[in-house]
Image (tube, helix red, strand yellow):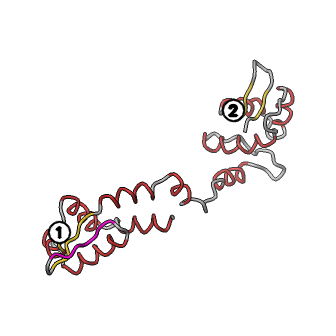
Amino acid sequence: MSEELVTFFKALSDANRLKIIGLLARQPYSVEELAVLLNLKASTVSHHLSKLAKVGLVSAKTDSYYNVYQLDEQALELKSRSLFSQENLAASVADVDADAYDNKVVKDFVRKDGGLKTIPAQRKKLEAILRYVVKAFEVNKRYSEKKVNEILSGYHADYASLRRELVGAGIMKREGGGGDYWREE
């Protein structure tokens, strides 16, 4: 489906094709009329129309010696709904590594022993590190503050800041002041 999306956008990526779409949205035109209106050669207009027809945006009807082109508004609406559906947009990035940024940040901030060189100051980088650190905790298992501090001290001497950031970012939950901590899915 992403190939269809690319083809669709390529068809619309030319200023003259967009003008043709705009003109045909008003009324049908022949190649010769469009050529005069756009100050282009008829062969150039035919080329543009063939690209637009290929993606189903325009259609032609024969009217004596001329082909009269019109915008297929229903096809445009259906194609827009289909191409821009949540599933198709998600499929267009299926081959993208969603964890690439986190992996790069972890590589930059984590020592060979798994501990942190430093706690990042930039929020986005800090969030990536927090997603890395929280993996030390089992989902839905309750931990005492003492146990959380013990685990976090394996990552950095400032375990209190890490603990506060994990809770503040909503990555870990806390019950009561100094009570139980847990990681939700």
Q: How far across and how far down the image is residue 30, in percent?
A: 17, 73
What secondary structure predominates along the stretch shown in magenta?
strand
**Residue at the disc numbered 1:** 29
**Residue at the disc numbered 2:** 165
Q: Secondary structure at mark 2?
A: helix
Q: Is residue 58 magenta?
A: yes
Q: How far across and how far down the image is residue 100, in percent?
A: 65, 56
Mark 2 or mark 1, which is nearer the start of the sequence? 1
Tag 1: residue type? Answer: Tyr
Q: How far across and how far down the image is residue 169, in percent?
A: 65, 33
Q: What residue do we see at 80% from left, 21% from top?
A: 179
**Cα separation between marks 1 and 2:** 63 Å
Q: Quadrant for the C terminus, please.
A: top right
Q: What residue do we see at 39% from left, 68% from top?
A: 10
**Is residue 106 or residue 185 the one in the foreground?**
185
In this image, 70 relative to 89: left or right? left
